[in-house]
Amino acid sequence: MTLSSVSDIDASQPKHLADKYAIAGIGETAYLRGSNRTTRSMATEAISKAMADAGMKASDVDGMLSYSSGDSTFSPFIAGDLGIRLNFYMDVFGGGSSTEALIGIAIGVIEAGMCKTVAIFRSMNGFSQVRIGGTGARSAVPVKGDEMHSRAYGWQAAGQMFAPTFMRHMYDYGTTPEQVAMVKVTHSQHAARNPKAYYKTPVTVDDVLSSRFIVKPLHLLDCCVETDNANCLIITRAERARDHADRPQALIRSVVGRACKPRIDMHYQHGPISTVAGHYAKEILWPNAGLGPEDVDVTGAYDAFTFTSMLQLEDYGFCKKGEGGDYVSNGTIRLGGKRPNNTAGGHLCEGYTHGINMVIENVRQLRGEVDDTCPIGPDGKRIHTHDYSDSGTCRAVKDVNVTANLGWAMPGTGSAMVMVKG
Amino acid sequence: MSEYLKPLPEPSIDSQPFWDGLKEGRLLLQTCSDCGTVRHYPRPMCEKCQSMECHWTEATGRGQLYTWTETHHPFHFGFKGELPYILATVELDEGVRIQTQLLGGAKVGDLRVGTPIEVVLDRATDEWVLPYVRLVK
């Protein structure tokens, strides 16, 4: 079967919204395994914190977006609890790659005059209720629709569905488990400087390779953590963000949402499965941003598994096709390297949020407001040492002007965003 | 027959002939009646020519390995007794790929992209026959 004809993507859409919108507020709960809280409770906390961060009160927020897989609480309940009267809301189905897509939707509805400021949240008990790894209650649901062409034979969890892509990448390009293990190693070193990370202990390549197989070639430590948490981003026009808070703003330069490979219901049917959605998404992301991968200071490449970061960094053009294994293992992605990835520890170490905490971290980096383990000065702020050696305490990257988030739903679907400091 | 603990398909109007074929011992592939394109899994429209007319043709049951993994973790209790098991994506000679389990005690270390396979039909319950693959002997 031949690949559908999608080579002529029009990436010439107007760029006049670049830098016109900002992530004005960020909020997060603790990252826990066993929150003993409802998703409603966690969502209200995260949004309340994001509003405080943005310098906004309930009457300043009139839009709400959330995403879930039926494992969260819908916006009408959350808004009511916060005293927010909504002019717009929508709760969409989906997990990874929703964050950047919803940011684009928020810009669109504000631009259409439907509301002025949108709170985007994801609240989930990904460990204690609906386990994201696909065990427990999530595995026992009845086979429905066209899942019957995989589940009956034992295909169902994310690791089982994604690992064949990695397997084929190893085969086609010689990528090794040792190389992708460096993603976990690096993120664990980053998480060691993040007081909020769930896993703060650095690990080694040997630790990853000697952990038990989950889905060969994936080891336990190639897989992300399952946690309970809520995160929020507040999106509004840049001038409104500045009116409410006097600080460097994280401006949205370019966004692409849920860009797809052909036939994503069965992407492995079509063309090389070692290529992922970023191959297409990059044709929108970079032209609209007016810059390219070489201009990016910090990345947030979705690490549901070690190899998902690698596949995305490669297909978004941070290295040549087939060289992702080298890119993630040659020092580039670690703090102190040329372009650190997931400086808070990502899904492998900080906590699993379906992508939104990686955007929060890049906002912090752009603002210069990273909360690491550096000493606190007389003004109550961290004195960043920029010491990234093994004994260092810093995870604030020096002079961050451009960040990129690469969101992953599955090999066939991805979202992405470029932010700039402004 | 002992209790069957694995998930079982719920056929749709689009896929019913595929499952009926398995019960008769045949692996049927949906074929566009207008342009002849073979497609799998069963679905209402030909993505090449958008025809909704189709017929079913019997596959040779031969193909090649495209990729594979080996599951070591019991995601579903029904598969616990089979761990570890190999999941294979297979390119059939008809040009479509199927996802299933590789049976027959193959070792992952022996597998290569392009390794020849054949489809084997296995009776799951009184009602259900499911398609698997094994290495060509």
Image: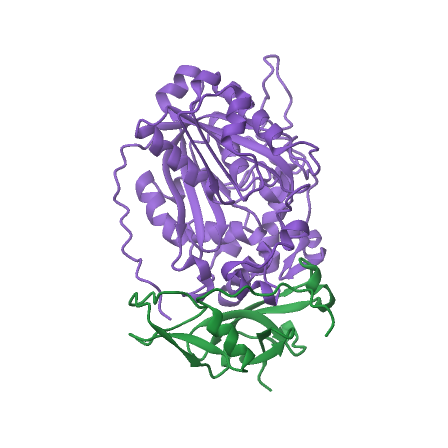
Chain colours: A purple, B green
Please tell me how many numbered marks the rendered image carries. 0
Q: Is residue A157 above or below residue B49?
A: above
Q: Quadrant of residue B120?
A: bottom right
Q: Residue at x 51, y 52 (%)?
A: A310
Q: Position of residue A70 (x, y in %)?
A: 55, 43
Residue B134: % across, % down: 60, 79
Residue closest to the eye, A32 or A40: A40
Q: Where's the C terminus of chain B, which quadrant? A: bottom right
Reply above or below: A240 against B56: above
Rendered position, B46 above or below A330: below
Q: Residue at x 49, y 49 (%)?
A: A409
- Report the residue that reaches farthest toward the top: A378
Q: Identify the residue at horizontal 61%, vertical 16% (top origin).
A: A377
* Residue B65 visible from this viewpoint: no
Rendering coords of residue A234 (x, y %): 46, 27
**Residue A182: x and y, percent?**
60, 50
Residue in the foreground of this view, choosing between A62 and B25: B25
Q: Residue at point 47% right, 64% down?
A: A268
Residue B79 in view (yes/no): yes
* Residue sticking out furthest to the bottom: B137
Quadrant where the N terminus of chain B is found in the figure = bottom right
Q: Quadrant of residue A263?
A: bottom left
The foreground one among A10 and A324 is A10
